[in-house]
Amino acid sequence: MKTYYDDSETRSPEQREAEQGERLASMVRAANEKSLRVRETFAELGIESADINTIDDLQKLPVISREALVEWELKEPPFGGFSGQDVTAERIFISPGPVYEPHLMEHSLWGRGYRAAGFRTGDIVLNTFSYHMVAAGLTFHEGLRSAGATVVPSGTSGTETQVALIRDLGITGYTGTPSFLKAIIDKADAMGYSFRNDFGVTRAVFVAEPLEPSLRQVFEKEYGIDTYQMYGATEVGDIAYECSEKKGWHICEEVIVEIVDPATGLSVEEGALGEVVVTRLNDLFFLFRFGTGDLSRVMPGPCSCGRTALRLDGIAGRVGDAVKVRGLFITPSQLNAIKKVLKDINFQVVIIRESYRDHLTVTIESDKEGEEIKNRFRSLFHDKCTVKIDTIEVVDRGILSTEDKLIVDKRDWK
């Protein structure tokens, strides 16, 4: 049985670096020809496309944050000047911000991770990511198909519907967030089923939300579900994935990953913690050095699975004040946009973990009637951030200080 997605996963590190360097140089030339944003950046820096031929040369370019990308796309929709005028994309997705992303049509997108997790022809997999507007549902769908699996596009259907699909269709695998799988299992228990004995789900791949070690233990020991993690960002696609060894995340073959000092944008010492900065090699969307805002380090030594790509040591935290809640980012710019509309209130967003799920509470200072401001805020928050609020508290003025952070993340991932 084929273990690897393709032979590129076992090529020598020297061959990988050389071939990625060639693809990078080709992408830089295409970007210089097609992208106004890239040409302007080169001119400001006093460099030419010929100056970037190797992975190390990327440090001549600035790291681009999501905040900056949102700002550019608002000024110059849809792609902020990072793509040519004649762009032909199979699909265009939207993520909160808004950020518009042309679908990067590599056949292997997310397929490597699903293959490494053991999905094959004959597996029937529940895909619980949204298929509406955002990239998640369709791109994970195609990744599963490229690994050979049959996909059930259940999306964000309620837990009772998910249980019925698992029962009726003989589901063998799951992909989504770990908290939602736990909610499905709890619903099955409440409906009188034994999830382990009555159903055939033996494999799960999680994306967009951290898998807590204690919850992994629950899935694997109590329910017999072999669990895997993948890591990516909507702006650049898949970045890394776990293999059967589950000792770090292998970096995908189609991306260049740098670990940099967030203050300087320069590479940190080998093994040191830094920001994960990604360049996806493609000829459609010329986003060089995208700063994910995530902190990680490169693990030493080869993996016994035989893959030769470097491995990330999970995610250690976030750079700055943006946080990811149930797979979606909440940023200060989004919250400031709410403040511009609701000028007469002060508020704070707090995220905690309850029963392996992110719980989002908003505290609002307002003189207006409670339910009215709650409903208005809830609607505006969903429009700007997409994330659902769990609890809204309206309090008297003076409880919150103007110096208090807009976002407070109290989650403990240990």
Image: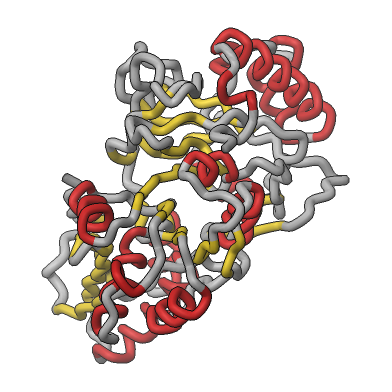
Asked if one can make out residue 406 in the rendered structure from this viewpoint, the answer is no
Q: Is residue 1 above or below residue 272?
A: below
Query: Looking at this view, is 395 or 200 the one in front?
Result: 200
Picture quarter containing residue 340?
bottom left
| Residue 155 x, y percent position in the rendering | 52, 71
Q: Is residue 207 left or right of residue 148?
A: left
Q: Is residue 301 above or below residue 337?
A: above
Query: Looking at this view, is 343 or 39 the one in front?
Result: 39
Picture quarter containing residue 12?
top right
Q: Is residue 412 left or right of residue 301?
A: left
For the N terminus, give its image quadrant.
top right
Q: Is residue 274 above or below residue 337?
A: above
| Residue 382 x, y percent position in the rendering | 44, 73
Asked if one can make out residue 60 in the rendered structure from this viewpoint, the answer is yes
| Residue 86 x, y percent position in the rendering | 87, 45
Q: Is residue 293 left or right of residue 362?
A: right
What colouring style does the render use?
A: secondary structure
Q: Residue furthest right?
A: 86
Residue lying at 29% horizontally and 39% vertically, measured from the top left:
317
Q: Residue furthest left?
A: 399
Picture quarter containing residue 16?
top right
| Residue 72 x, y percent position in the rendering | 62, 46
Query: Looking at this view, is 167 or 412 the one in front?
Result: 167
For the C terminus, give its image quadrant.
top left
